[in-house]
Image (cartoon, rainbow, N blue to C red):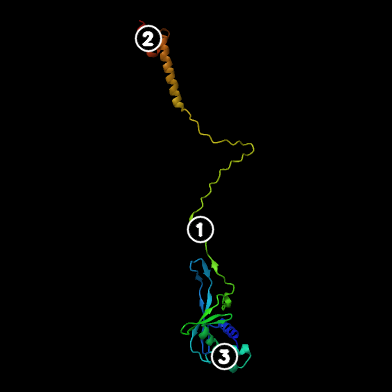
Amino acid sequence: MDISLFSKCVKDLIVENDRVDVPYLGSFTAEMLPATYSDHQTTIHPPYRKMSFHKENISLEQGRMLLEKVMKESDVSLDQAGVELGWCLSRLSSELEGHKSCKLPGLGVMRANARNEFFFVPDDHLDIWPDGVGFEPISIKVSEKEQEREVVPAAEPVPATKPVPAMPGWTVQEKQEPRRQVRPVRLVLIILALLVVLFIIAAYVFTDEMSPILDRLLYTKEELELLRR
């Protein structure tokens, strides 16, 4: 059994289970994480299942699910599957202790620190959640032009005045300012004043001719008879 078959067995099981126990090595676990924003809040990342590894002592009985998977994939007995899995894990542990890294095809990379503590780094595009197929990050970055439109509102255009179409038989006249009109009372007063002025001038110039007229205007009939006597 090689490392590729081991990786395939673990991946197939982790898709349908939240935990896969590996005898003598540890446990692979998967947890559901919600959608998140990017650092600058310009992208929304969809929810996904995160896979991780925890080193611990796992017995053959605890790792029976993996053993049965190896048995099915290798087409061997359960005992033989245990033997082959043991050889594979022994080589994996030696690789980690010696080179501090071991590639798990289709899953990611197993690593070890200076104290030989194992941990798992999943591939960037690891897909262990069938229900999330097709989910893509959503960009919410606003372009500079859109930002300007939001910050500086565009001035509303002033509608141009349209000429009124002339109907048949109609004439369109331009609006004119109303002319000042002289009131009738004022006109009468002006005429009377002019007449009085003309009368005074005539009486002064034509004293003899205007004297009878003035007498009739200034005196009554009885007073005129007294004056004549």
- Residue at 52% across, 69% down: 44
Q: Which mark is residue 147?
A: 1
Q: 179 left or right of 227?
A: right
Q: Estimate the x, y position of residue 5 in percent, counting from the top left.
A: 60, 85
Give the position of the N terminus as an image quadrant: bottom right
The answer to which of marks 2 and 1 sits earlier in the sequence is 1
Q: CA distance from mark 1 to mark 3?
A: 61 Å
Among the two numbered marks 2 and 3 on one chain, the one whose residue lies closer to the N terminus: 3
Tag in front: 1 or 3: 3
Q: Residue furthest front?
A: 98
Given the image, on which type of amino acid does mark 1 rest? Gln
- Distance between the alpha carbons at the discs numbered 2 and 1: 104 Å
> Which residue does the image show at 36% across and 10% down from the upper left?
223
Residue annotated with mark 2 = 224
Q: Amino acid at mark 3?
A: Trp
Does the residue at mark 2 contact the one at mark 1 (Cβ under 8 Å)? no
Give the quadrant of residue 192: top left
Foreground residue, 7 or 50? 7
Which quadrant of the structure image shows residue 213? top left
Pick the quarter of the image with the C terminus.
top left
User: Above or below — where is 99 with respect to 162?
Assistant: below
Which residue type does callout 2 highlight?
Leu
Please state which of residues 82 and 169 is positioned toward the viewer in this rendering: 82
- Determine whether the residue tagged by mark 2 lies in a helix, strand or loop: helix
Q: Which residue is tagged 3?
A: 87
Kindly check if marks 1 and 3 are in contact, taking CB atoms under 8 A apart as contact: no
Disc 1 packing (10 Å; few <14; some 14–19; many ≥20): few
